[in-house]
Amino acid sequence: MKNLLRNVSVLALAGVAAASAYAADYESYEAFAESDGYALFTVNNLWLLISAALVFTMHLGFSTLEVGLTQQKNTVNILFKNVFILAAGVLTYAFWGFNAMYPGFADDSAGIFAMGSWFGVDNADVSLMTDSYAAYTWWTDFIFQAMFAATAATIVSGAVAERIKLSSFMVFAVILVGFAYPLAGSWKWGGGWLDRMGFYDFAGSSIVHAFGGFAALACVLVLGPRKGKYTKDGKIKPILGHSMPLATIGVFLLFLGWFGFNGGSVLSADPLLVSYVFVTTALAACGGAIASMATSAIVLKKPDLSMALNGILAGLVGITAGADSVGVFSSIIIGAVAGVLVVFAILFFDKIKIDDPVGAISVHGVCGIWGTLAVGIFGDFSVGVQLIGTLTYAAFAFVFSIIVFGAIKAVMGVRVSEEEEFEGLDIGEHGQEAYPDFSITSR
Amino acid sequence: MKNLLRNVSVLALAGVAAASAYAADYESYEAFAESDGYALFTVNNLWLLISAALVFTMHLGFSTLEVGLTQQKNTVNILFKNVFILAAGVLTYAFWGFNAMYPGFADDSAGIFAMGSWFGVDNADVSLMTDSYAAYTWWTDFIFQAMFAATAATIVSGAVAERIKLSSFMVFAVILVGFAYPLAGSWKWGGGWLDRMGFYDFAGSSIVHAFGGFAALACVLVLGPRKGKYTKDGKIKPILGHSMPLATIGVFLLFLGWFGFNGGSVLSADPLLVSYVFVTTALAACGGAIASMATSAIVLKKPDLSMALNGILAGLVGITAGADSVGVFSSIIIGAVAGVLVVFAILFFDKIKIDDPVGAISVHGVCGIWGTLAVGIFGDFSVGVQLIGTLTYAAFAFVFSIIVFGAIKAVMGVRVSEEEEFEGLDIGEHGQEAYPDFSITSR
Amino acid sequence: MKNLLRNVSVLALAGVAAASAYAADYESYEAFAESDGYALFTVNNLWLLISAALVFTMHLGFSTLEVGLTQQKNTVNILFKNVFILAAGVLTYAFWGFNAMYPGFADDSAGIFAMGSWFGVDNADVSLMTDSYAAYTWWTDFIFQAMFAATAATIVSGAVAERIKLSSFMVFAVILVGFAYPLAGSWKWGGGWLDRMGFYDFAGSSIVHAFGGFAALACVLVLGPRKGKYTKDGKIKPILGHSMPLATIGVFLLFLGWFGFNGGSVLSADPLLVSYVFVTTALAACGGAIASMATSAIVLKKPDLSMALNGILAGLVGITAGADSVGVFSSIIIGAVAGVLVVFAILFFDKIKIDDPVGAISVHGVCGIWGTLAVGIFGDFSVGVQLIGTLTYAAFAFVFSIIVFGAIKAVMGVRVSEEEEFEGLDIGEHGQEAYPDFSITSR
C-alpha cells in the first residue's frame, strides 16, 4: 500500500511543479494571460475559489448542526454566534491573521512567532497578486484560508452552547481566530518549526480540528456544565436537541463542504491528487458512519442517528490529516476507527461531567489527534513527529484558551445567569424567539 | 429540430476525441503534467469531481424531501436510512459494484454478467489511474459513479417509508445497490447487450430512475400499505407529511444536484454539450413544474405545492435520458408531459391502493419510462429499442426486488409491528424523537 | 486605492481579450476543440455554468428566508410562489426575455427598446452557439442570465407576502420578469443608452436589486399593509416570522449564491478578477453583518438576528455594482454602510406604514441605490451618471409596477379576502397546511 502512497505524492508534485513555472515568468498579467500556462493556472485557481465556497458552506452546516442538537430556546443565540464568527473571522483574518499565518519565515528565524497585517501591505503593488504563487492568486489564497480560519471558533461555539454569555464568547472568538489560530497555523503551514521537523497535516486534523476541539475543552472546563445536566446524586440527565432534520442537514452540508476543505488543500486542481482526495475523504466518512452506527447499536442497544451523524464527522476529521497520502483501504479503516472512537469519547466526556452539547470535543479534538497519528501509522511519516505535532496543537489551544477564557471570566464573566439559562438565551440575550409564530393545531 | 440534435451530438464527440488523445500518450504522469493537453484534462476532470459533489447533494435533497412528505414520528428513521444508504452504497460500490458495472465486456462475451472487485485490482498500478480515460482519472470515475449508485436505493426508501423494518431495509438496500444496480447498469453503461443494441439512456432515466421506481413498486406490493391509509369501506385517507419547507428544500437541492447528474454525464467539460445539457435540464424541470401546477389546479381544484414539487422532479427524470440529444423546445414538452403524467400517476397508484408516501413510483418509475421513450420520439433513436431497454430495466428491477424482498420477508420479516407503526418508527427502531425539545408556547 | 482599482480593471481586460481570440477563428467546433485556446474557453465556460448553478441556489435561499420571516399559515403559499417564479421566469426568458435583453443595439439606434424571441432564432444555426462569445457558449449565456432574471420578481414576492392573491401575483411576476426586466436590463447590459452614457453596474445593484426593490415598493403601496399590522391608534404591531433557522439557512444560501452572482458576472474565469470579486463580495457581506449587529444592539438595545441577517444581504447588495472595481478596504466600508442603512431603512418604512414583511425594499431597493452610488464614490466612475442610472432603474420599476399592478388590481383584484388573510393563504389558496402532521408532545 505504501508504494501507492509514495507514487501519489510524487505524482502530485509534478502537477504543481508544472504550474509553478508560470507565475513569475511574465512581465505583466497581460503577457501571462496570453501564455500557454494561463489556462492551467486558471483552472487551478478556479478550483481553489470553488473550494472556498464549499468551505463557506460548512459554516451553514455547523450552524444547523448546532441548533439541531440543542434546545429550542437557545436557537437564535447559536445562529447569531455563527453569523458573528464568520463575519468577524473573515475580517480579523484580513486585518491581521492572513499575513501572520503565512509569513514565509526567514531561514535563520526560530519559525515560532509572526506578525502581519494585510492592510499594512501595499495593495497597489499588483505584483503581490500573482508572484510566487504556483497555482492561484493572492486573493484566492486569502479567501480560501479566511474561510478555514473561522472554523476553529465555530467548533468551540458548539461545545459552550446554551450557557455562555454572548459578549464573552464574541471577545474570545475574535482573539482565538484573529491571533491564536494564525500563530499556531504558521508553525506548520507558514513554514515554521513543526514544518521543518517533518510534521505532516494535510488539511488540518490538528491545525484546525484538534486545535478547535481542545480550545473547546478548555472553555467547557472554565464554564462548567449546563444546569440540570448532572444531578447531585451523580446521574446524567440527557438534554435533548430540538430538530434532528436540522442536525442532519448540517452534517450533509459539512460532508459536502469537506470536498472543498480537503480537495482544495491540494492547492491546485491536479486531477490525480484532487480525485484521490475526494475518494479517501468520502470513504473515510462512509466508514465512520457505518462504524458508529454499529457501535451505537451494540453499546446503546439501538442504532442512533446522532451517533451516525457524529460518525460521518469523525471519519472526515480523521482523514483530514492524510487524505492525500494514505491508501484507499487505509482511509476506510481510519474513518471506521474514528467512528468507533467518537461514540466512546462522547460517552466518556459525559461520564466525567464535561458537558459538550454537540460532541465537538470528541469529534474534533479526539478524532483530530487520531487522524494526525494515522498519517504516521498508515502513511510514510514518523509517528513520533506526528505525536509531537498534534499534542503541540492540542496543548497550545488548551492552555491558551484556559488563560484567555479564564481572564475573560475574571473580567466580565462568561456565563449567563441561572434565570437566563432556564428561560433561554434567545430571550435573554436577543429578546427574540426562534419560532415566534409556530403554532400547532391541537389534535 | 433533429438537425440541431445531430449537430450537437456530433460536435460533442469532437471535444472528447480531442481530450482522449492525452491520457495514454505519456510515459509518466510527470510528462503528462507538462504536456499541452494537461490543462484540458484538468478542467474536464474537475467538472466531473464537482458533478460528484452535486450528485452527493441529491442525497441531502432526497432526505429532506422524504421527511417533509411523511409523518413526524418517522423522521429519525428516514434520516437514518438515508445516511445508511449513502455510506453503505459508496462502500459496496468500492468493494464490488464499480468494477462489476464497468467491466469492458470482451467483444465475444454475451455482455450480460460481470463480476468485479475494486480491491482485487492492484492499486499500486499507477497506470490504472489515467490509462484509457479520456477526460478524467480512475478515481474521479469511481467517486462520480459511486454517488450515482446509492440513488437507486434512496428512491425505494421513500416508497416504503413509515412501515418498513429498518434491518430488512438495510439488507435489501445493500443487495440492490451492491449487486443488482451495477449488474443492470453494465448492460448499457458497461458496454453490454443493450448498448450493442443501440439503446440510449444519457444519464439514467431508465438505468437509475425507472430501475429505482420499479424496485420500489415491488417492495410496496410485498410490504402493503400503511395502516389506516385505505379504510375497509374503500375510502382513501390521506396521510399528510409534516413539513412542506423541508420537502421544498429537498426538491430545490435535487434540482441543483441534477446539474451534476446530467451535466456530469457528458463525462467531460465540453463547453457546448455541458451548457446544452444545463439548458435542457432546466427547461424540462420548469416545464414540469408549470404543467403539474396547472394539472393540479384543474384536477384537484387548487394549485398544489406537493404536485408542483413532483412536477419539477418529473421533468428532471423525464429529460435525463435525452438531455444531450433532444431539442430545447422538445425538452420543455418532455418536461411538461412528465409534469402532467406524474399527477395522474400519483392519483392512479393511490386509487389501486399502492401506497407510496412520497410518489416515488410515479416520479421515478413512470417518468423514467416516459423519458426513455421520449429520446426515441424527439431524438434520433429507435422508439422500439428504447421501449425494449426501459422495459428491461423496469422488469428486471421489479422481478429482482419481488424475489429478494420476498425472500427477506420470509426469512426475517419486512414490516414493523402494528404498535410500532402507530407509535412511530423513531421510537420503535431508534428510541429517539426527531424534535424532542420542540415546545410551542401555547397561544 | 484608485490606482489599484484601475490596475485590476485593466488587467481583467487582458484575460478576456486573450480568450476572445478563440471563438470566431475556427471553421468548425471540431477544429476549435483541437486548438490551443479550447482549454481556456472550456474553463471560462465551466465557471459560468457553475455560477448559474450558484445563482439557482439563491432561489432556494430566497424561499427559505421568506418563509422563515413570515407566519406559518402562509408558508405553502410562499413556497409555491417561489417555485412558480423560477419556472415561469426561466421559460419566459427563453421565449422572449433573453433576446430582448441582449439585442446588440445597432450604433444608430436609440438603444431604448428591444424585442426578441429565443425560439424565433434559428436554433439549427450552430454558429450561434459559439460565435461572438469570448468565453462561453450561447447556451451558457442563456442559462446564467435566465437564473438572474427570475430574481427581480422573487424580491417582490417577499414584500407582498401574506396578503397578495396568488393569481394576481402570478400575472404580475410574469410581466415583470418577462417584459420589464429584460427591457430595462438592455439599457445597460444590452449596450443601450445607459451603457453609452458610462453608467456602471457590475452585477446588478441597480439592474436587479434596486429594480426589484422599487417594484416591491410600488406593489406594497397598491396592496396596503397586512391586517392588524398598524392599529387604529397609530401603533405598530410586529407580526413575527415562524422559523429563524429557515431564515438563517436562506441568508447563508444567498451568500453562497452571490459568489456566482458576482463571480460569474466577470463573464470568464479570469483568475485575478474572479478571486478579487470573491474577496470584495465576502468582505462587504461581513462588514454589513458586523455593522448591522452593532447598529441593532445600539438602536434596538439587543443584538438582533434578523438585522444581522439583513446586514449580510445589505452588504452583498451594496457591493454588487462595484465588486470588480472598488478597493478591498472600500468594500468593507460599502458593506458596513449598507449594514447601518438597512436597519434604519427597515425602521423608517415601518414607521411610515409601508408593510414589508421581509425588509426587501430596504435590502434590495435602498442598498441597491447605495451600492450603485458607491461605485462612483469609491471607484473611477461619475457619481452623477451613477445617480442617473440608479434612479432610472428605481423610477422605471416603480412606475411600471404602479401602472401594471394597479391595472391588475382594477381587473382582477390583488388582495385576498380578510377572512382568508386571517385564516392563512395556505388553506385559502392551496387547501394545504405547511406542517399538517407536526404534533408536539405536550410537556
Image (cartoon, coloured by chain):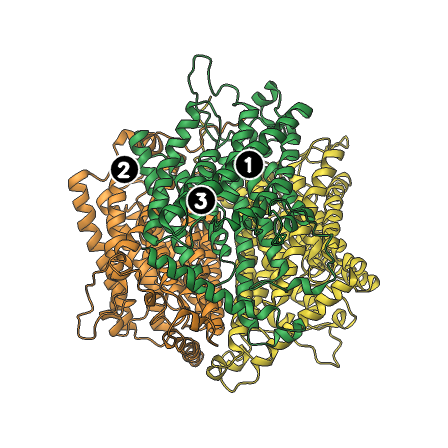
Chain colours: A green, B orange, C yellow
Label 3 resides on the chain identified as: A
Q: Are marks 3 and 1 in contact (CB under 8 Å)?
A: no
Q: Where is residue C427 in the image (x, y as percent from the top left)?
A: 51, 41
Q: In which quarter of the image is the C terminus of chain A?
A: top left
Question: Looking at this view, is C324 or B263 the one in front?
Answer: C324
Q: In this view, does A414 lie above or below A143?
A: above
- Give, as a three-letter code, the residue at label 1: Phe
- Give, as a three-letter code, the residue at label 3: Gln
Q: Nearer the viewer, mark 1 or mark 2?
A: 1
| Residue B69 appears in view | no
Q: Are marks 1 and 2 in contact (CB under 8 Å)?
A: no
Label 1 resides on the chain identified as: A
- The first of marks 3 and 1 along the sequence is 3
The label shown at residue C146 is none
The residue pinned by badge 3 equals A386
The residue pinned by badge 2 equals B233
Image quadrant in which you'd find residue C170: bottom right
The residues bearing labels 3 and 2 have C-alpha atoms spaced at a distance of 70 Å
Label 2 resides on the chain identified as: B
The residue pinned by badge 1 equals A396
Q: Position of residue B154 (x, y in %)?
A: 34, 49
Q: Quadrant of the N terminus of chain A?
A: bottom left
* Residue found farthest to the front: A108
Image quadrant in which you'd find residue C110: bottom right
In the picture provided, is A180 more to the left or to the right than B46? right
Say few, some or many: other residues with alpha carbon within 10 Å of mark 1 (under 14 / 14 to 19 / 20 or more). some
Question: Looking at this view, is B139 or C365 the one in front?
Answer: B139
Q: In this view, does C195 lie above or below C342?
A: below
